[in-house]
Image: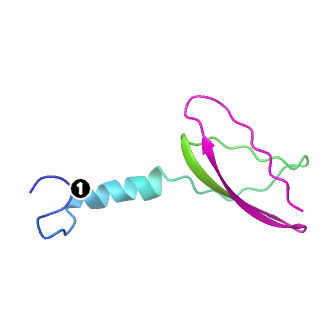
Amino acid sequence: PAGLVRSDLSPKPVYERLMKLIKGKWWTSLELAADADGAVRFRGFGGRYRISVSSDEGARTMETDLPASKSRTIKIQVD
């Protein structure tokens, strides 16, 4: 069998390595605090992101797409 798994569907070592890269090194997972203006800035890979925000006023989770080739500003209101 070729590819990432054997004929019995058990993962080959390359599968395990690829999963460590995708879920570990390439996966963006941050916990950041807002600055005095309430802004948070980060750089990430293009793709779909789930963003969770919490404050004394409440919490909110949303999903958004981050383009691969340009900056994007996302405003999240928590109240």
Q: Residue 41: x percent and y percent?
A: 73, 43
Residue bounds of the magenta highlight: 52-79
Q: Quadrant of the C terminus?
A: bottom right
The amino acid sitting under disc 1 is Val
Q: Residue at x 55, y 52 (%)?
A: 28
Q: Does 62 sit left or right of 68 as displayed?
A: right
Above or below residue 18? Residue 60 is: below
Q: Residue 22: x percent and y percent?
A: 41, 53
* The magenta stretch spans residue 47: no
The crowding category of the residue bearing disc 1, from other C-alpha atoms within 10 Å (few below 14, some 14 to 19, many at least 20), is: few
Mark 1, secondary structure of its residue: helix
Q: Does 3 sit left or right of 28 as displayed?
A: left
Q: Residue 18: x percent and y percent?
A: 32, 54
Q: Does 22 sit left or right of 77 as displayed?
A: left
Which of these two is toward me, 70 or 19? 70
Q: Residue at x 45, y 57 (%)?
A: 24
Q: Residue at x 78, y 56 (%)?
A: 33
Q: Residue at x 22, y 60 (%)?
A: 13
Above or below residue 65? Residue 28 is: below
Task: Tell me the quarter of the picture where residue 52 sits.
Answer: bottom right
* The magenta stretch spans residue 62: yes
Hey, which residue is sitting farthest left in the picture?
1
Hey, which residue is sitting farthest top in the picture?
69
Task: Tell me the quarter of the picture where residue 57 sits.
Answer: bottom right
Residue underneath mark 1: 14
